[in-house]
Image: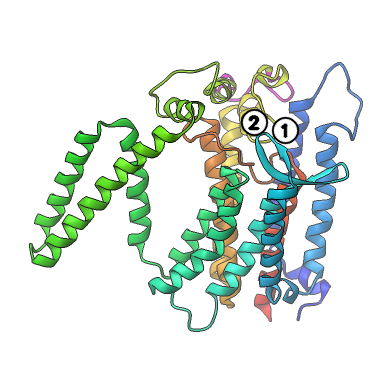
Amino acid sequence: MNTGGNTFRNMDKPLVLIYLLLVIAGWFNIYSVVYDPENTGFSFATRYGKQLMFIGFAFLLGAAVLIADIRIFMQFAYLYYGMAIVLLLAVLVLGSEISGARSWIKIGSLSIQPSEFAKVATCLAFSRYVSQPAMNMKRAKNQIVASLWFLFPMVLILLQPDAGSALVFVSFVLVLYREGMSGKVLLAGLVAIVLFVAALLVNRYILIGIIFVAVAALLFRNKRTFKNVSLAILLFGICSCYTLGVEYAFNKLSPHQQTRINVLLGKEMDVKGAGYNVNQSKIAIGSGGLTGRGYLQGTQTKFNFVPEQSTDFIFCTLGEEWGWLGCTVFLVLYMALLLRLLKIAERQRNVYARVYGYGVACIFFVHLFVNVGMTIGLLPVIGIPLPFFSYGGSSLWAFTLLLFIFIKMDTRRYS
């Protein structure tokens, strides 16, 4: 077992440095969002003041994880998962509603979002299950059972409803792929996404015709045996029913939800309604040009043209004030974080640590991809924070726990 001194000596310092750079840069951007030239005094009542306190506690949390015995995270993983499930159930009954979702539990003046910490608990429990000796992830039964570990909290979060946080749990599918799940499952998921979008853009009869031609082409490329013909008919039936089901489900959505999807797909223009946030965000990013307007000089930021600038849309503040170069530096830094996580995960001797490391990397990747994607108008606005950058205590603390538990695991590679 590592002592405290060995832990700090053996911890991956580049990973910690990237974490510190992202957290500090995030605070400066939050400060810029709420900066008021008429009131230059520092106040802990402001969002930048509160975020500074959240950061201080996050640093203490990270240090505590490094000092602690790693076994308290690994051996009690199922207990933490059970506690997370209880909190997710409790928030449905006792939670406070913010922005249309009952996702928060208030403790005095502090609001805690259990779904953020559920990601940590699920990653620990999921990793423990998948890393069991003789666990074969090529078997469909094991894949289904492993999926239940993240599907259950995902469903509870959808009931809040919080689609953004729920979507993050899909990232564990990528971990299953690393551990042996067939790539055909990922291909099937990609086909489902393409058909979903096509069902909303293309006439149903034309789309079914395209599906028929595609399936027929696949059949003629292979031996036209009775088995292959039967599979082709089954595939055609499933894809056709799926596309019709998407159209049916879309028509059951409320009008404002339909409008949001149509705006995203370019079927409607609604820059003052459902498309307002994204349109203003793109204006802010575009106005930054190559080098940006300069720190504290963003006009879209200062006049509150973009809602949720310090949380879900903080990337547009980065784009406006620091321009294309600033966004590129940020994305390169974040890619360095993800690549470092994958490299460290691959060098682990312990299967549990490797699976957990991939889980952390996939969670961060989905957060980055979805947040930036919705900010620039490529993905729907579903409300998801940018790790280490967005305002909020729950998200910062949960991301810090995810990262530093893995850093602690990595220090054991020397033992």
- Residue 138 in view (yes/no): no
- Residue 119 in view (yes/no): yes
Q: Secondary structure at mark 1?
A: helix
Q: Secondary structure at mark 2?
A: helix
Quadrant assignment for the C terminus: bottom right
Q: In the rendered image of this protein, does residue 93 appear above or below residue 360? A: above
Other residues around mark 2 within 10 Å, as few (<14) / some (14–19) / many (≥20): many
* Viewer-side residue, 370 vs 115: 115
Residue depicted at 36% across the width and 38% down the height: 248
Residue depicted at 80% across the width and 24% down the height: 35
The image's colour scheme reads: rainbow
Amino acid under label 1? Asn
The residue indicated by pointer 1 is 29
Label at residue 318: 2
Q: Position of residue 42 (x, y in %)?
A: 90, 30
Residue depicted at 60% across the width and 43% down the height: 161
Query: What's the magenta region?
Result: 286-298
Residue depicted at 55% across the width and 32% down the height: 375
* Viewer-side residue, 386 vs 6: 386
